[in-house]
Image (tube, rainbow, N blue to C red):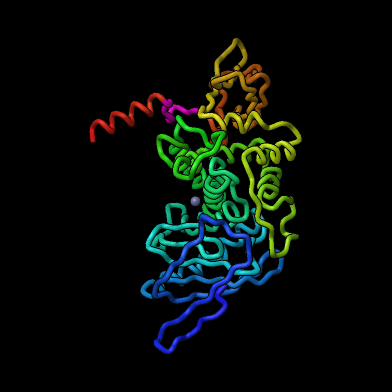
């Protein structure tokens, strides 16, 4: 919060800023520039009136106002509706324009996406950094190994928003692009202690999997749990309650781990969900689903690297209608069915190895040959 500006006789100014909320320590920065201030006020779901500020570079004022009017309130309204109240309502909602792409500085995100709308009709960067006010700043990972809590959830919010503003086809397109970025050689959340550099490293660390595989695994979790229970998981993770709209500022920030997530998912599902997290988040494998004709029946079987339980249900279109097929011992039998009658997972809800995903060995060979040729 800007408390006061003190004018000195030599024309210099002293700006006195203060914050009273628990603050994500990797996200503190000073941005100093010839800014113009664009302002409004937003009424939170919990009734708090929140100042909204955009510090834009003077030369960009017109574009900044256009973005501000088009997306600021709409974006916050989305997050408040699907997740819960903006966490720092007693201070402000803010953005400052920067020469770099962006960063989740609490209550004043860095913005450098040049006011572009992406293929899905909105400014993904603005949306992504706002997602971090919830996933990153309200709920922070205790260890960098759990960074998917920031980036996987942060990135998944753009998929959910795409579905809302552009419909199913665009959301499927965004999800499939997410799928194509998955690194088959890396996990999402390795066990142990890691630095942020190790976690973001492409090739030697989880890299893009924190975003892409984390985000896609969350989409599959939404299928398993159903929408209501999925969003309850997200709310309990972030606020420790399924009714966060009842919380008033100040809202408590908290640390969470992947193990906390397993416990929350299992509690809300009413069954142990460790198998899901173990395969999709902890291990590097992407499970494969095989299908074969067995007499009059079709047999579906999950192939995973080890002896882990993996009874992941799958939507299957059979003669035009989509059914949820449950598995026992990684196997499901569709009686009196021909392979030609079915289509597995027609809406891309299940994270599994498709023919477009290279094996880890293929990916490594590809990386070596592209290195050799450059
Ligand atoms: Zn991010």
On the picture, is 113 further left or further right than 218?
A: left
For the C terminus, the quadrant is top left
Of 10 and 124, nearer the camera is 10
Tell whether position 355 is magenta.
yes
Q: Quadrant of residue 371?
A: top left
Q: From the viewer's perspective, is residue 216 above or below residue 115? A: above
On the picture, is 99 further left or further right than 188?
A: left
Spot the residue most to the bottom. Answer: 9
Percent x, y of residue 142: 60, 46
Q: What secondary structure do most residues of the magenta stretch adopt? A: loop
Residue placed at 41% from the left, 57% from the top? 101
Q: From the viewer's perspective, is residue 94 above or below residue 237? A: below
On the picture, is 324 further left or further right than 173?
A: right
Residue placed at 56% from the left, 50% from the top? 157
Tell whether position 55 is magenta.
no
Spot the residue most to the left. Answer: 373
Start and end of the magenta stretch? 353-360
Of 168 and 268, nearer the camera is 268
Q: From the viewer's perspective, is residue 174 above or below residue 307? A: below
Of 247 and 80, nearer the camera is 247
Q: From the viewer's perspective, is residue 130 above or below residue 367? A: below
Q: Quadrant of residue 226?
A: top right
Q: Is residue 4 visible?
A: yes
Spot the residue most to the front. Answer: 9
Q: Is residue 176 visible?
A: no
Percent x, y of residue 275: 64, 28
Percent x, y of residue 264: 70, 41
Percent x, y of residue 326: 67, 26
């Amino acid at each position: 919060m800007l408390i006061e500006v003190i004018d000195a006789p030599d024309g210099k100014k002293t700006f006195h800023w203060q914050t009273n909320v628990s603050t994500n320590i990797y996200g503190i920065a000073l941005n100093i520039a010839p800014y113009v201030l664009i302002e409004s006020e937003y009424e939170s779901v919990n009734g708090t009136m929140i100042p909204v500020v955009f510090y834009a570079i003077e030369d960009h004022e017109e574009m900044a106002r256009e973005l501000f009017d088009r997306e600021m309130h709409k974006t916050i309204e989305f997050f408040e509706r699907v997740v819960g109240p903006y966490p720092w309502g007693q201070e402000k909602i803010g953005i400052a324009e920067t020469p770099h792409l962006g960063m989740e500085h609490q209550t004043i995100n860095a913005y450098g996406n040049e006011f572009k709308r992406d293929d899905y009709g909105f400014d993904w960067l603005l949306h992504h950094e706002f997602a971090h006010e919830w996933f990153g700043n309200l709920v922070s990972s205790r260890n960098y190994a759990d960074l998917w809590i920031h980036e996987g959830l942060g990135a998944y919010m753009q998929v959910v928003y795409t579905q809302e503003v552009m419909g199913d086809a665009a959301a499927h397109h965004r999800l499939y692009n997410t799928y194509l970025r998955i690194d088959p050689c890396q996990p999402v959340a390795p066990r142990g202690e890691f630095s942020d550099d190790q976690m973001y490293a492409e090739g030697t660390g989880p890299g893009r999997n924190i975003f892409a595989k984390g985000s896609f695994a969350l989409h599959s979790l939404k299928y398993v749990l159903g929408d209501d229970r999925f969003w309850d998981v997200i709310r309990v993770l972030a606020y420790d309650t399924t009714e966060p709209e009842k919380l008033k500022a100040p809202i408590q920030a908290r640390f969470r781990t992947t193990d906390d997530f397993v416990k929350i998912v299992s509690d809300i599902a009413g069954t142990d969900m460790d198998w899901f997290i173990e395969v999709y988040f902890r291990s590097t494998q992407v499970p494969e689903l095989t299908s074969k004709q067995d007499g009059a029946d079709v047999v579906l079987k999950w192939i995973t690297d080890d002896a882990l339980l993996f009874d992941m249900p799958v939507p299957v279109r059979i003669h035009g209608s989509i059914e949820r097929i449950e598995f026992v011992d990684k196997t499901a039998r569709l009686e009196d069915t021909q392979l030609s009658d079915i289509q597995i997972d027609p809406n891309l809800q299940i994270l599994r190895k498709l023919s477009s995903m290279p094996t880890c060995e293929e990916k490594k060979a590809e990386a070596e040959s592209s290195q050799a040729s450059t």
